[in-house]
């Protein structure tokens, strides 16, 4: 048995410890330094670079090897490291007393500093570098992903000077494809070639995700050992983040088989995953300068960022379109009882959302088929297999024959996307895709020969890299992640359709359950976002407030601004809302009957909910700042001019101009409000914001991207509401206690909210009595008389409408308070009563006084 060789398979490469080879490439030196700055390891070539042998360096303080200035610079650079997988660079530093110039890389691993150095390339030290801005601009101007990849390859080749630069994309299984290439003439093309996952083993892909840049300067170079090989615990040195890390023999053999003399790889990381690589080959030794390599690494990160934005935008556009299709589907088939008899309309309705060649519908044991797919017997058998899966989940395969080999399904059907549309019994809509017969051009035989090579019992790299064509059968076009998300949306939509086609009683019960599940999930998501937002506002407002009163007023103003915005976008069921109404609401809150000091110019537009809430905060802070320091701080004279228009691309450009106010001086520090103005629109919406502190008056320019902006339907203008517009009469600004001498009844079932309401009413001068329920309110009314009442609509399992009846009979004015919207409060016999939107704020209650006829003060 001892003479039997170890079995060779594709996992041999995956087990190679490529990060612990214990050696470096010879174009630089390496030192490991303890936290007390003693040298613990050194590369054997140390004397070639700093004139001290490896043996003499061990155990000495690093300060005895390099200049104090260099050590100071290295210490400072270490303080900037954040996280274990970060490498900092220092360029063109005088490391030795003889002023020899070096480029350094420094990182920390397992409580030791790893310092790597190489001689600064004098002839390239002052070489002009390409403008990263112009490079990104050329990338941004490409219209398709294919053109984007090609331009990326050209830019990377211009940066590195390598003979061939490829954009190499991984698929879900780890195999790769060359999707773009830039190469010098006469060396052939690898464009379109595929490479199996074993060409870049699992541990290599993991390392590419940690260390984004890898240079192999000369495959013929002899590795330089780092000594001692093992530390006092018997552990080898982890060189995962090393710039100089040597190359495994099997990879060197692989490159030699390709005729490559040097290589360079730049990781392309998208959404935290290794999307692919810039794979660069040179047919001779090549070592770009450290500064050039650092620029190339930055380019790779910028390229990945742009790619991630493009992919997300494409996925979002696709999903938005598909959701609209799903909405139309729900509307058109809600009462269509022919679903079971004629499913052909379903494939037509879904074709634009998820391309498919056939469809099968299974509801309550009945089936219907259309297009390319299995017959009734095969479909019934497939449903039994699907019922083994977890309920309520989308399930997709692109090799149906391999997944279910015992099914008798025509070979032409190769892909399936199963959409469960109920829980019990199991009902499905199944989309089918036909076999996609295609030829894949492999970069050499993907099935590597199982033979022993010079490097022991491991797979020998392919010795021929000619294209190997392989006919792929039994596979369909895979269903993408975006298509699966759309299928989930369709699942929820069709759940409602099926429910409407079943028994009335069962339908109502099941619909309530499904809708509750959706509402709870959506409510949970929105409440978490709102709580996070409010928490952030509270924390950030506290850091800029000078006192408790100022803090409370700032906080109330910001939350009330969000509340007004929320009212407007929920009034039409979370639909886009009017920019002009938003501005009118903010104007009314600050100027009241003096709203003419705020001049608006522009054709009204609708903002999507996310943009509307962001804009509300921004303009609230602008109004607040103007009232404190700007044009609105001077009684009667100062004005604000706000204009907006849409540019040729549909983006909304907004200009804010303050005039006739006090001279403007740019503040020494920017508080939370200023941060909201300058950063909210760029950060939340991907737009632009610019603020200028002009002496004559503050100026601000904003750009909201077109995807958040909609035109206003002219037919709706005459019916547009003007919630928040300045009331006809407003409590005098100098009246600090407008409710002085009045007795007010507050009915509120939540103690904390009631305490908050009491506090606000008392600050306004009122004598307040509070009741948590209808019974207690009636008891109080039986023994006392009141001038005014504030009634929370929903009091747990009862409403305050009965209290309103009694107050109306006694001629006592009252107002409803609610967080559910005006329609909830007014859906009763007192539909004309004013409504106060929660939460209670001084601003909201003061504004409400202008709409209520209060008795004269006593």
Image: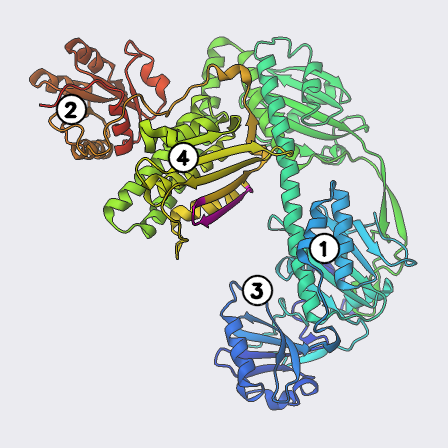
| Closer to the eye: label 1 or 2 | 2
Residue 647 x/y as whole percent:
61, 34
From the image, state whether disc 2 or disc 3 is nearer to you. Answer: 2
**Residue at image location 61% in from the left, 29% down from the top:** 320
Residue 795, placed above or below residue 438: above
**Distance from Cα at disc 2 to Cα at disc 3:** 63 Å
Give the residue number, with chain letter if any, for mark 4.
527
Q: Where 434 falls versus 683 (above or below)?
A: above
Q: Which residue is painted at 55% across and 89% down in the image?
A: 64
Q: Secondary structure at mark 3?
A: loop
Circles 2 and 3 in contact, beta carbons < 8 Å: no
Which is more N-terminal, label 3 or label 2?
Answer: 3
Give the Cα distance between marks 3 and 1. Answer: 19 Å
Q: CA distance from mark 2 to mark 4?
A: 32 Å
Q: Label 2: which residue?
A: 744
- Position of 337 relative to 382 (above/below): above
User: Which quarter of the picture shows residue 207?
Assistant: bottom right
Cα distance between the residues tagged 1 and 2: 70 Å
Disc 1 marks which residue? 277
Q: Position of residue 670 (x, y in %)?
A: 40, 53
Q: Which residue is mark 3?
A: 86
Q: Earlier in the sequence, mark 2 or mark 4?
A: 4
Q: Examine the rendering and report whether any part of residue 845 can be seen.
A: yes
Q: Residue 483, how many percent across, how many down?
A: 66, 32
């Amino acid at each position: 048995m001892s003479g039997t060789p170890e079995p060779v398979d594709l996992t041999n490469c995956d087990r190679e410890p490529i990060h612990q080879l214990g050696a470096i490439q010879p174009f630089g030196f390496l030192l490991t330094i303890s936290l007390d700055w003693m040298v613990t390891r050194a590369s054997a070539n140390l004397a070639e670079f700093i004139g001290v042998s490896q043996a003499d360096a061990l155990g000495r303080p690093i300060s005895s090897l390099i200049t104090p200035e260099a050590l100071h610079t290295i210490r400072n650079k270490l303080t900037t490291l954040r996280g274990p997988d970060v490498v900092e660079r220092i360029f063109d530093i005088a490391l030795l007393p003889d002023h020899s110039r070096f480029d350094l890389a420094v990182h920390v691993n397992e409580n030791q500093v790893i310092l790597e150095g190489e001689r600064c390339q004098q002839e390239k030290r002052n070489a002009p570098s390409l403008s990263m801005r112009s490079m990104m601009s050329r990338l941004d101007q490409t219209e398709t992903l294919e053109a984007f990849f090609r331009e990326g390859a050209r830019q990377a080749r211009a940066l590195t000077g390598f003979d061939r630069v490829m954009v190499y994309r991984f698929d879900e299984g780890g195999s790769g494809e060359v999707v773009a290439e830039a190469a010098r003439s006469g060396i052939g093309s690898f464009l379109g070639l595929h490479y199996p996952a074993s060409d870049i083993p699992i541990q290599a892909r993991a390392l590419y995700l940690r260390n984004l840049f890898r240079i192999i300067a000369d495959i013929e170079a002899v590795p330089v050992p780092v000594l001692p090989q093992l530390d006092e615990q018997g552990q080898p040195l982890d060189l995962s983040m090393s710039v100089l890390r040597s190359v495994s023999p099997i990879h060197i053999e692989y490159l030699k088989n390709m005729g490559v003399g040097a290589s360079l790889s730049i990781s392309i990381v998208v959404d935290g995953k290794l999307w692919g690589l810039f794979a660069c080959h040179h047919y001779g030794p090549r070592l770009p300068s450290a500064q050039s390599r650092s620029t190339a690494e930055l380019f790779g990160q910028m390229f990945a960022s742009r790619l991630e934005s493009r992919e997300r935008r494409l996925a979002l556009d696709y999903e938005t379109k598909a959701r609209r299709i799903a909405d139309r589907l729900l509307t058109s088939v809600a009462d269509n009882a022919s679903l079971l008899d004629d499913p052909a309309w379903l494939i037509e309705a879904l074709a634009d959302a998820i391309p498919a060649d056939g469809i099968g519908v299974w509801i309550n044991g009945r089936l219907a088929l259309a297009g390319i797919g299995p017959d009734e017997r095969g479909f019934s058998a497939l449903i039994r297999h699907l019922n083994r899966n977890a309920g309520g989940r989308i399930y997709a395969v692109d090799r149906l024959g391999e997944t279910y080999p015992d099914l008798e399904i025509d070979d032409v059907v190769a892909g399936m996307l199963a959409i469960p549309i109920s829980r019990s019994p199991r009902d499905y809509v199944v989309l089918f895709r036909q076999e996609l017969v295609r030829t894949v051009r492999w970069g050499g035989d993907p099935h590597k020969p199982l033979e022993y090579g010079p490097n022991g019992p491991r797979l020998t790299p392919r010795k021929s890299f000619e294209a190997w064509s392989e006919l792929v059968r039994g596979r369909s076009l895979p269903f993408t992640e975006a298509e699966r998300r759309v299928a989930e949306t369709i699942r929820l939509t069709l759940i409602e359709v099926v429910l409407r086609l079943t028994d009335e009683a069962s339908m109502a019960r099941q619909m309530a359950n499904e809708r509750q599940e959706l509402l709870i999930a959506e409510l949970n998501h929105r409440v978490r976002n709102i709580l996070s937002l409010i928490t952030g506002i509270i924390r950030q407002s506290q850091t800029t407030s000078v006192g408790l009163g100022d803090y409370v007023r700032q906080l109330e103003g910001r939350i009330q601004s969000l509340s007004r915005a929320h009212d407007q976008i929920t009034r039409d069921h979370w639909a886009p809302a009017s920019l002009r109404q938003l501005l009118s609401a903010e104007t009314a809150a600050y100027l009241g009957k003096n709203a003419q000091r705020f001049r608006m110019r522009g054709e009204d537009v609708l903002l999507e909910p996310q943009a509307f809430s962001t804009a509300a905060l921004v303009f609230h802070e602008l109004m607040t700042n103007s009232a404190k320091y700007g044009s609105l701080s001077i009684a009667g004279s100062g004005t604000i001019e706000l204009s907006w228009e849409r540019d040729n691309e549909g983006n909304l450009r907004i200009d804010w101009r303050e005039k006739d106010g006090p001279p403007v001086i740019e503040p020494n520090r920017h508080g939370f409000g200023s941060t909201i103005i300058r950063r909210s629109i760029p950060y939340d919406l991907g737009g632009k914001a610019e603020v200028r502190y002009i002496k004559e008056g503050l100026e601000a320019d904003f750009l909201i991207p077109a995807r958040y902006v909609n035109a206003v339907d002219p037919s709706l203008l005459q019916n547009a509401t003007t919630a928040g517009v300045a009331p006809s009469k407003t409590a005098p600004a100098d009246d600090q206690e407008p409710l002085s001498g009045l007795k007010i009844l507050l009915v509120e079932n939540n103690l904390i909210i009631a305490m908050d309401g009491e506090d606000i009413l008392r600050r306004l001068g009122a004598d307040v009595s509070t009741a948590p329920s209808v019974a207690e309110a009636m008891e109080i009314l039986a023994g006392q008389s009141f001038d005014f009442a504030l009634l929370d609509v929903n009091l747990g399992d009862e409403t305050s409408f009965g209290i309103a009846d009694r107050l109306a009979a006694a001629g006592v004015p009252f107002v409803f308070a609610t967080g559910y919207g005006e329609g909830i409060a007014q859906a009763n016999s007192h539909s004309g009563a004013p409504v106060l939107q929660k939460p209670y704020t001084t601003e909201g209650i003061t504004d409400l006084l202008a709409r209520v006829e209060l008795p004269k003060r006593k």
